[in-house]
Amino acid sequence: MSLRPGGRRWAVATPMAVNAIASGVSASTTLLVAWGVSAAEFGRFTLVLSIALIVTVGMVMSLHFVMYQELPRSRPEEHRALITTALLSTLVLGTALALAGVLAAPLLTALLGVDPRTLCLALALALSMAVNHLTESFLRGRRKYGLTSGLKIVIAFVYLGVSAYCLLVLDIRNVDGYLLALIGTNLLFALVSAVGFRIDPRSWSRSLARSLYRHGAYLTVLGGLSAVIFGVDVIFLNHWASQTEVGVYSIYNNFPKRLLGVVFADGIGLVLLPTLAVTDTSTALRRIGRLSPAVFAAAALLSLAASAVFFLLLRDEYPYSFGLMALAALGIGVHTVFNLYSAALSMDGVRGARALIAAQAAATPLVLACQAALIAWQGLVGGLVAFILCNLVLIAAVVVVSARVYRPGAEAPSVRRPEVRR
């Protein structure tokens, strides 16, 4: 029996609200860790997370985005083979890359400027994130929004509880325990999410795996570019500044960026990504263009307001500076607009991925040069200014490329169909 319009609205609005609460709990946990450890230790926490985000791209190979696209377009009887093939392939590839990273530790630690323990934590976190992202995409792709939001908020409270216990009871002042707790809760979500889908190893298919990876190849290149563009700033800061400055930068920029990203992915994105997968991209891009000033203003104001509040809760190691908050808010506003354009193009399959790759590839040399120059010159402030400028450059490149690819009269499918060969 189908839901009435009011019921459908509640079925969407309720999971979005629950996910927003879960995002708030996750943000509170990050603040708790920042408050409980030194700025230098929190800088190490950020460095591990930044490296993990880059490595995760190679482990998951964008199969979570492929699931967002393909599960809504596929017949229910095809879901088991898609899910099983994606999960088992990711477990094998992710484990192999983690082991390769451990074997290459002498080279990687010198290249990244980290110690072996930090590298191993980053690799373990990357593998847990890859599995977490993929299993969550199974639930969302099958439109199990209520189950997804319920599991997210429970896991968020588990992570908060474990972190609070480590800090307030065990008095742990280094970040290793909190990183292990994050890894554990990522794996816990992946495990309990299995109530929302079925795995049958016999349905694994080599040809389907090749097709999935081939379809995800463009998105993987795109994910790699994005991970480097938005993760290398922390590595640059770790090279040209102190680890304490990395921690302060993380609170001003990376924390609100991830908070807005989680709200986007876990709240609005809960239904936005599957919806974009079946929506005409030209129409979506035009709507984003019209809404971008409002989106920018809302994200910037939210970031500024949140910063003004949560900086009051932190210790003196994190300076309370309205100027730095304003710079961070401007960057978050522009970054949110870029994320909307990226989501619309990513959900258009190969054509959209190609357009986004072309835009990011063209902008990447300028973006990296801008980050390196400003961070080497001005450290924390340079990083905040670079983040604003880099997102503006990326938006300009996306608008120019998408205007050409999706120009009036360009060939476009009237019906969005699966692109993965069964």
Image (cartoon, helix red, strand yellow):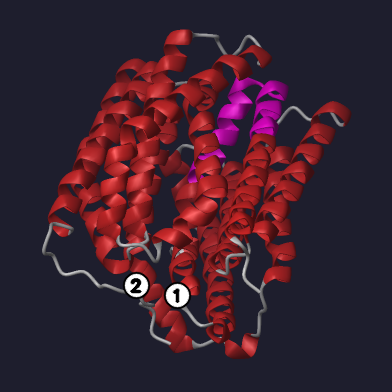
Is 286 part of what is drawn in magenta? Answer: no
Q: Which residue is mark 2?
A: 416
Q: Position of residue 37 (x, y in %)?
A: 69, 24
Is 172 left, or right, of 418 in this rendering? Answer: right
Q: Is residue 224 visible in the rendered structure shown here?
A: no
Within 10 Å of the Cα at label 2, are there few (<14), some (14-19), or many (20+) other Cα atoms?
Answer: some
Q: Quadrant of the C terminus?
A: bottom left
Q: Position of residue 66 (x, y in %)?
A: 44, 68
Q: Is residue 195 visible in the rendered structure shown here?
A: yes
- Determine whether 207 is above or below 140 in the image: below
Residue at 44% x, 33% y is 234
Q: Which residues are magenta?
A: 27-52
Within 10 Å of the Cα at label 1, are there few (<14), some (14-19), or many (20+) other Cα atoms?
Answer: some
Secondary element type, mark 2: loop
Question: Callout 1, which amino acid?
Answer: Arg
Q: Position of residue 119 (x, y in %)?
A: 56, 46
Q: Which residue is mark 1?
A: 73
Is 33 part of what is drawn in magenta? Answer: yes
Q: Position of residue 325 (x, y in %)?
A: 47, 16
